[in-house]
Amino acid sequence: MSLAGRVALVSGAGNGLGRAIAVALSAAGARTVLVGRNLEKLARTAAELDSARIALADVSDVDSVAAVRAELADEPIDILVNNAGVGGPVAPLTEIRPDEWDAVFAANVRGVFLVCQAFLPTMIDRGKGDIINIASVTGKRPLARRTPYAASKMAVLGLTRTLAAEVGPLGVTVNALSPGPVRGERMDHNFRLEASVTGTSVADAERAFVSRAALNRLVEEPEVGAAVVAMLGMPGLCGADIDLSAGMIAP
């Protein structure tokens, strides 16, 4: 499908899923706005795209989000992909510090709230727009030693469904995409942490994780970008949660 003439903001666009999503949106014809905290990483993503603008922001900070909204006042953003987030600690709940818990919710939930709150008004004024929140299958199935992350992603799903009910009648669709294990730096980091906690090898930690998926493999980053574009081609999709997990079904 063609997204020509549309402007898409992607948070956490410096690497990983954010970079892959921005690449897919650009390839479909959208002008992209790349938001994140690291200018060097954002610049590397922008170099891969036909048309991109960079805006530095910490999505968990209200003043930072307000500043980037003011900076982008001239951009008719009508696609918003809330991708920014953190993996958080890998540890039993009894060993997780409150500040670690709060940091995960600040990035993964507060960030979605603040960015939606900042950019929704102009979508509502125009009577159209699409929001896709990147959640995770971890919000819907048990994953030991990952309680902050799992709880935060379930919160994103609740936010998505409720916001869809609020703004769908106003012409704005809100949906969630829930990837499963995606090959990349974050999963490599998680596998190393899991191996250190369980006393196994990194390879064994990865095999144990992907064995839960029907396809017995990790999802690839470009598949997530393609899924975002595909969702934008489904005008009747609103309040949905799409799994992209290589068949990682909740038990």
Image: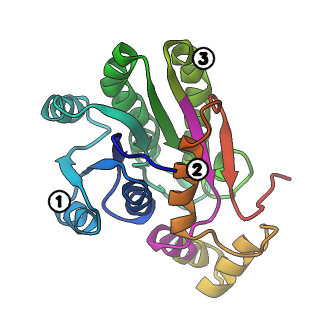
Q: Earlier in the sequence, mark 3 or mark 2?
A: 3
Residue 108 x, y percent position in the rendering: 45, 43
**Residue hosting label 2:** 230
**Rounded to the nearest whole Å, what is the CA distance between mark 1 and mark 2?**
29 Å
When the figure is inspected, residue 115 is found, relative to residue 225, above or below; the finding is: above
Q: Which of marks 3 and 2 is in front?
A: 2
**Residue hosting label 1:** 39
Residue at horizontal 20%, vertical 50%? 53
* Residue segment shown in magenta: 174-191
Nearer to me, 173 or 100:
173
Give the total number of marks visible in the rendering.
Answer: 3
Looking at the image, can residue 201 be seen? no
Q: Earlier in the sequence, mark 3 or mark 1?
A: 1
**Residue hosting label 3:** 165
Specify the amino acid type for callout 3.
Ala
**Rounded to the nearest whole Å, what is the CA distance between mark 3 and mark 1?**
35 Å
| Disc 2, SS | helix
When the figure is inspected, residue 248 is found, relative to residue 65, above or below; the finding is: below
Looking at the image, can residue 218 be seen? yes
When the figure is inspected, residue 160 is found, relative to residue 199, above or below; the finding is: above
Residue at horizontal 62%, vertical 26%? 161
Residue at horizontal 19%, vertical 30%? 63
**Rounded to the nearest whole Å, what is the CA distance between mark 3 and mark 2?**
22 Å
Q: Is residue 82 magenta?
A: no
Nearer to me, 7 or 208:
7
Specify the amino acid type for callout 1.
Leu
Query: Alpha-carbon neighbours of circle 3 within 10 Å: few (<14), some, or many (≥20)?
Result: some
Nearer to me, 230 or 218:
230
